[in-house]
Image (spheres, helix red, strand yellow):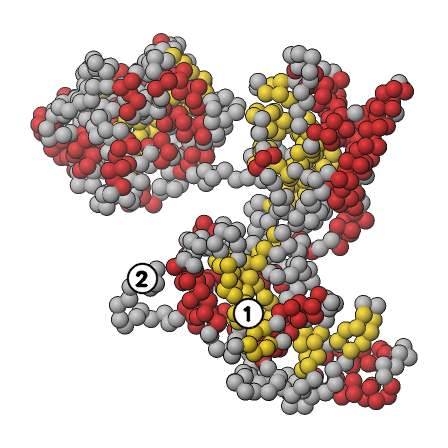
Amino acid sequence: MTEGQRLALDQLRDLVSAPGGAIQLTAGPRMANDAGGIGAEISLDCANTPAAAGGVRLRSRERFFVVIPPRFPFDMPAIYVPHSRWAGIPHVQWGFHLCLYAAPSVEWVPADGMFGLVERLTRWLERGALDELDPDDQPLHPPVAYFSSANGVMVVHPDLGELAPQASVFSRRQGRQQISAAQSQGGDTPFRLVVGITEARREDRDDVVEWISRSEWLRRQTTGELSPQQNRAPVVGAIGVLLDREMSFEYPKRAADLVANLEGLGVPREELFTAIGEVAAVNYVLASRRATGVSVVPAPLHVFVGTPSRRLADGVIRQHLVCWRVDDMGRFLAENLIFAGSADPDWADVGARAQSLLQGWIANAEISWVRVMESRPEVTVRRDLDSPAAWLLGRRVLVLGCGALGGPIADFCVRAGAAEVRVVDKDDVTPGILVRQPYTDDDVGLPKATALAARLNRIRSDNPVRPVVGQVQDTVLADGVTPPDVDLVIDATADSAIASLLERLRSPSRGTWPAVLSVVVGHHAQRGLAVIAKPGATGAGRHAFRELALASRGEYAQSLKDVADDFFPSEPRTSCSTPNPVAHRPPSPGQPHSSPLSRGTCSTQAYVLSTAADPVKPLSPRWLPSSDSTPASADQFSQGFSGWDGRTTLSVLILTVATRSGSASQPWPEYAQRCGAAPACAAPQSRLEAFFSARSTTPASASGLMTRPARPLTASFQQFTSITESKALPSSSPTTDSAAEGSPATLGCGIRIRMASHNQARRTKLLCRTS
Amino acid sequence: MYVREDGQEVLKRDVLDLLERHAADSAVVVVSSASFPASNKEGDNPPHVIARARYEEIAQAVVCTSEYADETSPHPVVFATSEDGLAIIAADNVAKSAAMSEGRGLALAGAGMLAALAATAILVRRRRQVSQPRGIEQVRQAVTSARGAEAAPQQPVGFGSL
């Protein structure tokens, strides 16, 4: 007996010693199984428990056998009943095991041990007596088919939708009387026979990729539309028997019992066998077309049984599927059923013999249940559904750069369900980049985009990733005029030339350009910066990076000190990685290799590890206003862009600058209140001019923001600070369009702007966060 | 049911299993004895509370003739037969059942029995006094009691036996 088991028994004795005898120890403890479990029988007082028709029928006292595992309390005890009176009741498996916890990993509390277990049992009994184990507003506990892993898995992708009969059972609690009532009132047919088109993707894995009717299955076969292979996998049909009511909570183990149950629920035996025979015969034809030699290797035959036993939050009851893998004899007999009644007496004889033998086979065959893995949208809920990443579902994304930023970003876009992800990079995979970029040794020498696309296309079967090998400006942006035909452009190149190019290309048609997300990480990869420019925003990444950099040394110097350290190191960065014998990207004015915003020498993963033990890192978001640009809340983004998800930035500090323009001048408190409801606004071109006009006294420092060492910039930030303090201009002051007031200047990005007087019309929301 | 072996009261489960195996779903155990005490002590004669507990585990109900329907004024326990077999008539339905039987000429046991039914019906209109609280709530209270008080311990404690 382990220490944990001794603890459990101590707790059990504490329970039993409570006055009144409500809990009694009636047998044990003793060894309960070969796994070292200790069993004890307890008796609980259940007298006078309120009950409802259809509920668990309780006696005045009930006995339970508790099996305490050796690793208690870290492993949860199991509870059985020493009788079969509750067999068939939901949440009673194998007729005697009580399913107390829907999610043991979160519901079982080791610290509460046997106390929590018994308390949970009391709730189970009370709700069971009232037939409320499956309340109407909760997911249903579906029936159980005890599968064997040796039978492989069946993955179901498409919804059944309208192919499924309407459920007659609206609530298990309402019982079968309602079934009869619904049918007597001319309800839907009690069953439907459908065909699931499956792809045999592995010997032990089949995927349902389409549900069709029986007639459509035969039509496609007769017209030759049914291909023996698709997506390089054999195509096989599987019959689906979809019922309008539940059969039992535990499915039978013998074929005869299943057929009898189906017959009892209105599925005629002959019609069932005919449908199975149709599918099996076509499967054989398909196998013949795939055969390369004289021997035909038919694919396994599967039979689905569907019952209305699934329910999500919308309350609609949908089909729960179990799957039977018919053995070879059954499949062979089924393949020949269609010959029964043939005009050719020989074939007719074959068919008749198959029919006869099938009856005998049914009488003796055991059912091999297959594990069904559901991917149907109608019965599953994406885990990112309520997160900003849900915006990516079905969107088309262009990812520029396939390195340490672009690689993970593209990965997350694919997992988030983006309909199309184009990944662009000109470089090849080299050994040195394996330290921090998502490639393997096998990828060395391959173009990054090709290797990345190949890997990401293995995430989803619909192959959403398209590689583009080459310079961004020579490929996806070669046109120079037409905006990319995507919903989101992600600049993960950390290349100032690309950032400047994007600014320039967007400038004349920014209203029609998709949203642009620009991402960089700091020198040590401890901070990240993500900038979102909505369609119509005056500036994109380069513009907003500058604004943030200025803010970090100005009005928000205290709260953004860590950010400022990356933007403007007190000492010039001298350390640099050398992933290759020569620098893979020569220093440039826009991005020197030791730039504070270069890709850094530490991987993001390394940062995650280092911060895991660092309790002083800020953990909560910091919302900061700036002088220009209105905030971008989730509501504002909802029509075209619903925000950005932390996926793209892993566990580094995220700085999101959402640049908006065109709203009226508002003081910060009002802005804070409007965060959730700011109106969409137009983007006058003069906003960009106005922004830079705020730094009109420091054009040189502004232009050199990313590149100049810290000391020369200090003065300019002091000036910037003084400028931001001068924000207290009348709200009626000229807002933006003051071309006549300004003088032209040239920034590093090559965009000519006009200097104008300061305006406070735009604001910027800065979100800083660690996770 | 319980046999003293080596100074210990040992439950003979096989006896109970036999009873349960051959009992109908709605089986009722009628205990023709004095009222059950709240608890037993060493040397007590039957009835034993622990025995009642075991009977309650194998039958749908356990009826003690001295406690039915009120411990202070016991009355007959009424059974009737129907298509479903023999069943105890719920106390609240005794009067109605008696009337129905009389009206249909189905004399249960003659005039004397009908008189007893009527008396029982009157009796059950009183609230039955429950000497000892029963039910799942008592189980829950036992759990609360076993967990101990919510107050922090006065003395430093370690990690227990683990």
Relative to B111, residue A571 above or below: above
For the N terminus of chain A, the image quarter is: bottom left
Secondary structure beneath label 2: loop
Residue at 34% across, 15% down: A444
Viewer-nearest of labels 2 and 1?
A: 1
Chain letter of mark 1 equals: A
- Read off the residue under disc 1: A26
Please name whichever residue, A319 or A764, is drawn nearer the observer in this view of the structure. Answer: A319
Q: Are marks 2 and 1 on the same chain?
A: no
- Read off the residue under disc 2: B159
For the C terminus of chain A, the image quarter is: top left
The amino acid sitting under disc 2 is Phe
Relative to A237, residue A120 above or below: below
Please name whichever residue, A140 or A482, is drawn nearer the observer in this view of the structure. Answer: A140
The image position of residue B3, as x and y in percent, is 59, 77
The amino acid sitting under disc 1 is Thr
Secondary structure beneath label 1: strand
Taking the image as shown, residue A643 lies to the left or right of residue A78, namely: left
Relative to B130, residue A638 above or below: above
Q: Quadrant of residue A303?
A: top right
Mark drawn on residue A411: none
Residue at 69% across, 45% down: A252
Q: Is there any visible trace of residue B36 in the rendered image? A: yes
Relative to A696, residue A97 above or below: below
The image position of residue A677, as x and y in percent, is 40, 41
The image position of residue A149, as x and y in percent, is 57, 37
